[in-house]
Image: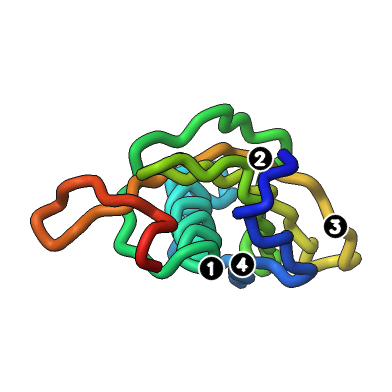
Amino acid sequence: MNDARIKPSTAEPAIRVVMMPRDMNAAQTIFGGVLLSYIDQAGFVEARRQSPRRYVTVSMQQVEFHQPVFVGDIVSFRCTTERIGRTSITVRVSVMAQRFEGGQDIHVTDAVVVFVAIDDECNPISILDDA
């Protein structure tokens, strides 16, 4: 999107995490829910980078896991702001896993997360006005 209000993406991931044994399921891969939690956190970091507000997650769309993640993988969550509305912000999160053995980068998934800016009473507020 070519919206002048959106700050350009950064080269660095919003977050980077080493996967630990506590995050492993019975199939000896990382729980999808653990990755969803990190996707949510990374999207929040990007939303705050765009405008310092309190945000709540409204939806997480288009999540399909393409490859498993294993204990010891370093997982990077890179974000791009796709849209800034009056009260909502839409962030695409791309997830890459650097394998513990071999060090190759594997595309794991992408997700689109929508956040809404809120005030102290949890009412939606404008994202860009009075920032």
Please identify, in this view, whether the residue under mark 3 or under mark 2 is nearer the observer: 2
Q: Identify the amino acid type marked 2.
A: Asp
Of 72 and 6, which appears nearest the observer?
Answer: 6
Marks 2 and 4, the one that precedes in the sequence:
4
Please identify, in this view, whether the residue under mark 4 or under mark 1 is nearer the observer: 1
Asked which secondary structure carries label 2, the reply is strand
Give the labeled residue for mark 4.
Answer: 14
Label 3, label 2: how far apart the Cα atoms are: 14 Å
Of 64 and 84, which appears nearest the observer?
Answer: 84
Give the labeled residue for mark 2.
Answer: 110
Q: Would residue 89 be visible to someone looking at this image?
A: yes
Q: Identify the amino acid type marked 3.
A: Asp
Asked which secondary structure carries label 1, the reply is helix
Give the labeled residue for mark 3.
Answer: 105
Callout 1 crowding tier (Cα within 10 Å): few <14, some 14–19, many ≥20: some
- In the picture, the quarter occupied by the C terminus is bottom left
Give the labeled residue for mark 1.
Answer: 49
Instruction: Name the residue: 70% across, 64% down.
Output: 73
Residue 30 locus on image (x, y percent)? 55, 51
- Whether pointer 3 and pointer 2 mark residues with C-beta atoms closer than 8 Å, the reply is no
Q: Would residue 24 be visible to someone looking at this image?
A: no
Marks 2 and 1, the one that precedes in the sequence:
1
Side of 107 where 47 appears, left or right: left
Marks 3 and 2, the one that precedes in the sequence:
3
Label 3, label 1: how far apart the Cα atoms are: 26 Å
